[in-house]
Image: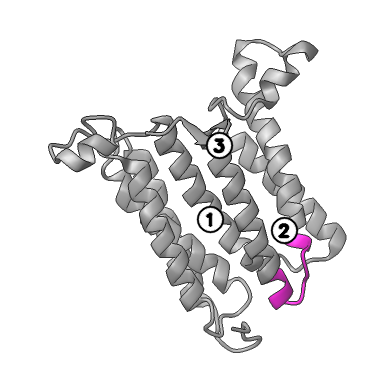
Amino acid sequence: MLPVLPIGPLTLPTRPALILLGVWIGLALAEREGRRRGIGAAPAADALGGLVIGYLIARLAALLPYGIPSPLDLIYILRPTDALLAPLPGLLGMSAWIAWRWRIRRVPWRVGLDALAPFVLVLAIAWALGDWAEGLRYGRPTALPLLAALGGGERHPVPLYEAALGSLALFLWERLRRRPWAPGGAFLLALTLYSAVRWFTEGFGTGSAILQTVALGGMLLGLWGLSGLTQEGSATPS
């Protein structure tokens, strides 16, 4: 585990640093995809705004059970070193912002989702690495010495599994996205690959039957969507 990252005279909290790095790389890839698909950098810009709004909503939703934060607590709310988040409200807020912006910009939603596919995969990898560095989401006990050492001394390092397989999923996505998918195919491919990663890694977790079922559902949904897409029409430039 690596809760802090020493860089010369600076000492940075590793988890926020990794997540911010993932956001930067993911947005760069999303901008690249947007330009390839003829919609420019709009999806990447809107994703950045949605990420900020989603983070604030997730922080507020997680803190509300403890009372309404006062204005003096704004610094605490914005502090990225705290892992207290409510993922579902944050995701809904982010999605609503992106949908509103795309409606104003008249971005075709399927093409926009295709452009954001690498952003989602890279952010998931960075988030998993950050969880491992912070000592979060370790799984079931393991007797294998190396895995036990990486998992806090006794448990499976589930976030490392997720990051490694997520990197493989990103590589496969980069290879397979060059096929002549119809609009929406690249995003469904990313959904299928990431859901497969989570379905596998959650098997090493603790009390993860619900998440594993959700991941299986995402994988089946992605495969069903891909099977329904025709490969005629606009081909993705390589």
Q: Residue at x 30, y 52 (%)?
A: 200
Check the picture and name the quadrant holding the C terminus: bottom right
Query: Of marks 1 and 3, which one's residue comes earlier in the chain?
Result: 3
Tell whether label 1 touches label 2 (CB within 8 Å). no
Query: Image quadrant of residue 117?
Result: bottom right
Q: Nearer the viewer, residue 198 or 118?
A: 118
Q: How crowded is the residue under tag 1: few (<14 C-alpha within 10 Å), some, or many (20+)?
A: many
Q: Which residue is mark 3?
A: 8
Check residue 41 for magenta coloring.
Answer: yes
Check the picture and name the quadrant holding the N terminus: top left
Query: Of marks 2 and 1, which one's residue comes earlier in the chain?
Result: 2
Percent coordinates x, y for residue 120 in the rendering: 56, 55
Q: Amino acid at mark 3?
A: Gly
Q: Which residue is mark 1?
A: 122
Q: Nearer the viewer, residue 227 or 52?
A: 52
The residue most toward the front is 9
Q: Amino acid at mark 1?
A: Val
Q: Is residue 7 left or right of 112 when viewed as pictured?
A: left
Identify the secondary structure beneath mark 3. Answer: loop
Distance, label 1 to label 3, CA atoms, is: 26 Å
Distance, label 3 to label 2, CA atoms, is: 32 Å
Distance, label 2 to label 1, CA atoms, is: 13 Å
Q: Which residue is mark 2?
A: 44
The residue most toward the bottom is 232
Identify the secondary structure beneath mark 2. Answer: helix
Q: How crowded is the residue under tag 2: few (<14 C-alpha within 10 Å), some, or many (20+)?
A: many
Query: Image quadrant of residue 27?
Result: bottom right
Percent coordinates x, y for residue 129 in the rendering: 44, 43
Percent coordinates x, y for residue 100 in the rendering: 80, 52
Q: Is residue 33 left or right of 45 when viewed as pictured?
A: left
Report the span colored magenta: 34-43
